[in-house]
């Protein structure tokens, strides 16, 4: 299947686009179905345990092609690949205990794991796929923030973007384990889509903040109402936000600066996924 997608980029692009739109446009409907048929009938604790069990089952399924793909690979290659997988599992566990409200949110990891595999068949490079997969995750969250839940969302959900990033990384680690090589040459610095996009995004954010079109915190002193606010309303003071009416449920809301401090080092680490893989001709 992966080989077919890599050889038929046009078909891959159509499948990838349809899959991404399906993921983005069905949030409300899927959330409603899950809440009505699982969350409310089972209760939150049982529901969380069920979702966690499903997640662990999917991980076992993931390990089948992962372990099979590592056969006949060099010892150093296996060690590095396992290190990446264990790092993702560790970060997922940390995320569940810090930035996840309910366990069903780990579906982001599954969704973007699949997206990464589809996206790689088009882009052909690990780092490029990691970057654009994360950007697509950000667009997904922006759609929810601005369109789906404009009155309910008080902050841009960087928490979910981190889960999306972990999902993309998980998909790429599987491709690495299988031995899927990069199929495009490394472009020069000024031709890199990552560099160009990063510069455009950075300049846009700086200019938007300077001209008061974008605000970061609700206490920013502005002369006019911004077009976009990363945080509309200040939440609970301190590290944890507590969810009513279940005071035992708590999670941390990742702020913009925190997100950068988390995602940039992780991006650097996972940008080395192509180590030990030869470029296909």
Image: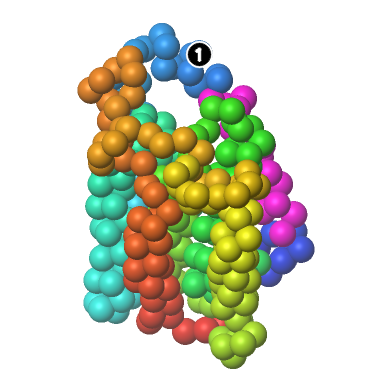
* Residue at the spot 46% in from the left edge and 63% down from the top edge: 172
- Crowding around mark 1 (Cα neighbors within 10 Å: few <14, some 14 to 19, many 20+) is few
- Total labels drawn: 1
Q: Is residue 18 magenta?
A: yes
Q: Is residue 191 left or right of residue 161?
A: right
Q: Is residue 27 left or right of residue 262?
A: right
Residue 57 visible? no
Spot occupied by residue 275 in the image (x, y as percentages of width and height): 38, 80
Spot occupied by residue 176 in the image (x, y as percentages of width and height): 42, 68
Identify which residue, 191 or 84, lies in the foreground: 191
Where 274 falls versus 67 (above or below)? below
Mark 1 residue element: helix
Query: Farthest residue in the front direction?
Result: 223
Quadrant where the N terminus sits is: bottom right
* Residue at the spot 61% in from the left edge and 32% down from the top edge: 150
Q: Is residue 266 magenta?
A: no
Quadrant where the C terminus sits is: bottom right
Q: Which residues are magenta?
A: 13-31
Kindly identify which residue carries mark 1: 36
Where 169 falls versus 268 (above or below)? above
Identify which residue, 165 or 239, lies in the foreground: 239
* Residue at the spot 48% in from the left edge and 18% down from the top edge: 35
Spot occupied by residue 145 in the image (x, y as percentages of width and height): 58, 39
Spot occupied by residue 180 in the image (x, y as percentages of width and height): 50, 71
Residue 275 visible? yes
Based on the displayed image, in which of its 4 quarters is residue 81 positioned?
A: bottom left
Q: Is residue 147 left or right of residue 219?
A: right
Q: Main secondary structure of the magenta part?
A: helix
Query: Farthest residue in the bottom direction?
Result: 188
* Residue at the spot 59% in from the left edge and 90% down from the top edge: 188
Identify which residue, 231 or 223, lies in the foreground: 223
């Amino acid at each position: 299947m992966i080989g077919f997608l890599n050889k038929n980029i046009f078909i891959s692009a159509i499948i990838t686009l349809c899959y991404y739109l399906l993921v983005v446009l069905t949030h409300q409907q899927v959330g409603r179905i899950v809440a009505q048929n699982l969350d409310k009938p089972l209760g939150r604790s049982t529901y969380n345990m069920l979702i966690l069990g499903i997640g662990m089952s999917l991980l076992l399924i993931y390990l089948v092609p992962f372990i099979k793909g590592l056969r006949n690979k060099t010892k150093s290659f296996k060690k590095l690949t396992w290190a990446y997988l264990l790092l993702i599992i560790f970060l997922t566990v940390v995320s569940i205990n810090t930035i996840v409200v309910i366990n069903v949110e780990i579906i982001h990891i599954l969704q973007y794991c699949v997206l990464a595999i589809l996206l790689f068949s088009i882009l052909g490079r690990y780092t490029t796929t990691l970057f654009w997969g994360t950007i697509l995750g950000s667009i997904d969250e922006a759609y929810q923030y601005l369109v789906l839940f404009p009155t309910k969302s008080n902050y841009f959900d960087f928490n979910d973007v981190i889960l999306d990033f972990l999902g993309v990384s998980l998909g790429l680690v599987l491709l690495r384990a299988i031995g899927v090589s990069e199929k495009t040459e490394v472009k020069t610095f000024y031709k890199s889509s990552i560099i160009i996009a990063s510069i455009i995004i950075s300049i846009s954010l700086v200019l938007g903040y300077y001209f008061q079109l974008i605000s970061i915190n609700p206490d920013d002193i502005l002369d006019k109402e911004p077009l976009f606010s990363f945080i509309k309303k200040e939440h609970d003071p301190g590290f944890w936000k507590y969810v009513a009416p279940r005071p035992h449920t708590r999670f941390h809301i990742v702020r913009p600066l925190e997100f950068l401090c988390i995602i940039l080092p992780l991006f650097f680490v996972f940008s080395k996924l192509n180590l030990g893989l030869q470029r296909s001709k």
